[in-house]
Each structure stands twice: as C-alpha cells, then as structure tokens.
Amino acid sequence: MQSLLDPAVLFFALGVFAALVRSNLEMPAAISKFLSIYLLMALGLKGGFALAASGFTASVASSLGLAVLLSVVVPLVGYMLLRRVLSGFNAAAVAATYGSVSAVTFVTATQYLESQSIAYGGYMAAAMALMESPAIILAVMLANALRQKEQTVAVATGTPPMVALTGTGAATLGGHGLGHGGGKGGPHLSVGKILHESFTDGTQLLLLGAMLIGLLTGEAGQAAMQPFSGDLFKGMLCLFLLDMGLATARNLPAVRQQSPWLLAYAVLGPLVHASLALLLAWLIQVPMGDAALLMVLAASASYIAVPAVVRYAIPEADPSLYVSLSLGVTFPLNIVLGIPLYTQVAQRLWEA
C-alpha cells in the first residue's frame, strides 16, 4: 500500500484521472520531449558515476550478460505464443514490443528502490540500453523471413502475396496497405542497418553518451552534477509520469477493442518474463537490487522505440495493437503494482 502513495505513482494516477474526466490538462509536446531528454541524460550520468565507482567487475558482467540473454529469449518465446492467435507480422511486432524495454518503467523502478533503501548497480542503465535493440532486430528478421515465404508461396500458387501467406490478410498500417514496397509487403532491412539505426538513435546515443561522461568524470563529475542529476530527478519524473498518465488514458478505448487472449498476454506475459528473469538472476546470484531491476526490464514493454521502428520496418502489423497493449495495459500495471511486487519477491528470495 505504501508504494501506491509514492508521489510518482500518484502523479501518474492524476494524469489518468484528468484524461478520463476530460480535463483540459495537457503537457506541451516540447515539454514532454524535454522531460524525456532530461531523464535519459540524468539516468546515464548516474549509471556512469556508479560504474566509475565500482569498476567493471564479475557482478557487472553477469548482470549485463543476463540482460542480453533475456532480450533474446523473451521476444522469441513471445513470438511462438502469439503466432497461435495473430498473423505472423502482428505476432512479430507485439513480441518485439514485449521483448524490448520501457525506459520510464525502469527509471520509476530505480526511484522505488532508492525510496526503499535497496542498493542497485547504476550500470543497470547500460543493461536497459542493451535490451532495447535485440527484440527489434529479431522482429525485423522474422518479418523478412515471412515475406520471403510469402513470395515463394505466391510464385508457386499464382496467388497475390498478402493472401498467399496470411489467408485472411495481414493488418496494414492504418488499414490502407501503406509501405508495401510495390507488393513485397514491406522493406527488407539488413541487420547492419538496424544496428546502426539503433545505436545512433537519439535516445540510445544520449543515454550511452551520458553514461560515458559519468564514467570519465567520476566522483568529481558527480559532485558537480548533483543538483541536476540528483536533486531535480524525482520532480522531473513526477512531471513525466503525469504526462504518461494522460497518454495512457487516451489509449484505453483501443484497449477495449482487443481480443481477451491478447489482454491476457499483456497482463500475464510480463509476470512470466519477470519470473524468468528472477530464476536466472537467482541461479547466477546477481545482487538483489540488480535482480529486481532485471525483473522490471523483462516485464516492461516498449511504447516509444519499438513502435517508431516497427511502423516503418513492419508496416503489415497493426500499430493500434502493439501500442494499446503496451501503453494501455502493461505500462500502468507495472508502474502501480509490478515494480513493488517484483522488488518484494526478489527481496524475500535473496533473504531466505
């Protein structure tokens, strides 16, 4: 109950309430962008300062290695399950969404751990950065494989490609078949191009660059930046979560249109992913705070990075599907209930 009285959670709830009662409360787009930039920069600096203090130890390596493993296993398992109820392209897009991570969920989790006086490695910001891209790469590779199969079936049967593979027809961007590349179903992107775009993306570059600056400047840099990356952080997070509450409420009508099976996946999938992270973290005995954050990362779902890439890379997938599930269901559940639940479970297991 105490976790629900955290100011960050309450401001998120205020944003949801304001949108539901149709208040004219609104966060200007420029302010929202500024808050995103601030949070990423401050998070990167914190991670760099922590890494400068601890050094690259075996514990750091095991936590980061486990993060990469989870970022591959979660989307692959998710795709195999979702393929039973969705077309291949939609399954790949949703699997990428749930295989990638939410920076805001992670930032909120770090604040929760600090409020509970639970130590964690600041280098876990690097784990978040490492977990963002593999799911996107896998989804695009799966989509390219589906298109190749589609073309093969079309040639063999003389059937139009979209009908040949999906039977009922795959969902397209906005329902208008945009971006199909002259009937090929979408752009065939190379892994190298995806990697380049992932690591030169503004958010990734800012996070990793700020972390490097924190690592290079160390204790002196931490003292100089304390008012910026320390004292202001909680208030800025509350403002951003107020904006996220408004956005979440606006996605609720789209959530109500989704299949019960998908809604169940949006609720239960993160719990399974968090349990997998907990098991692996316990087996290799990463620090408890890191384990809790790995659970949060595994349970989170991207609603910014993945949609931005997938809308272009997999135009056959329906954006309202993966955005509404991640932002309208999984994000609020993690913010309100998931973070304290994952932390308490990790605490009890490590203290047993």
Image (cartoon, rainbow, N blue to C red):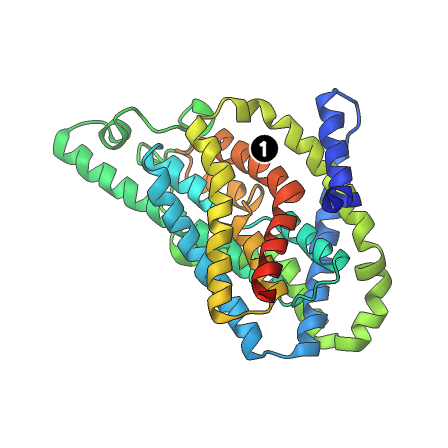
- For label 1, the SS is helix
Residue 3's x, y, as percent? Answer: 73, 46
Along the viewing direction, whichever of 34 and 243 lies nearer the viewer: 243
Query: Quadrant location of residue 166?
Result: top left
Indicate the quadrant containing the N terminus: top left, top right, bottom left or bottom right: top right
Q: Residue at x 54, y 45 (%)?
A: 301
Residue 266's x, y, as percent? Answer: 50, 37
Q: Is residue 256 above or below residue 96?
A: above
Q: Residue at x 51, y 71 (%)?
A: 62
Q: Is residue 246 above or below residue 120?
A: above
Query: Quadrant location of residue 50?
Result: bottom right
Give the residue at mark 1.
328
Query: Image check: 189 left or right of 254?
Result: left
Q: Residue at x 58, y 55 (%)?
A: 345
Q: Is residue 30 visible?
A: no
Residue 278's x, y, as percent? Answer: 51, 58
Query: Quadrant location of residue 253?
Result: top right
Query: Image check: 257 left or right of 346?
Result: left
Query: Image check: 298 left or right of 226?
Result: left
Query: Total marks drawn?
Result: 1
Farthest residue in the front direction?
352
Along the viewing direction, whichever of 253 and 214 lies nearer the viewer: 253
Disc 1 packing (10 Å; few <14; some 14–19; many ≥20): many
Indicate the quadrant containing the C terminus: top left, top right, bottom left or bottom right: bottom right
Q: Is residue 28 visible?
A: yes
Residue 284's x, y, as percent? Answer: 48, 70
> Looking at numbered disc 1 in the image, what kind of residue is underneath it?
Gly
Query: Image check: 291 left or right of 25?
Result: left
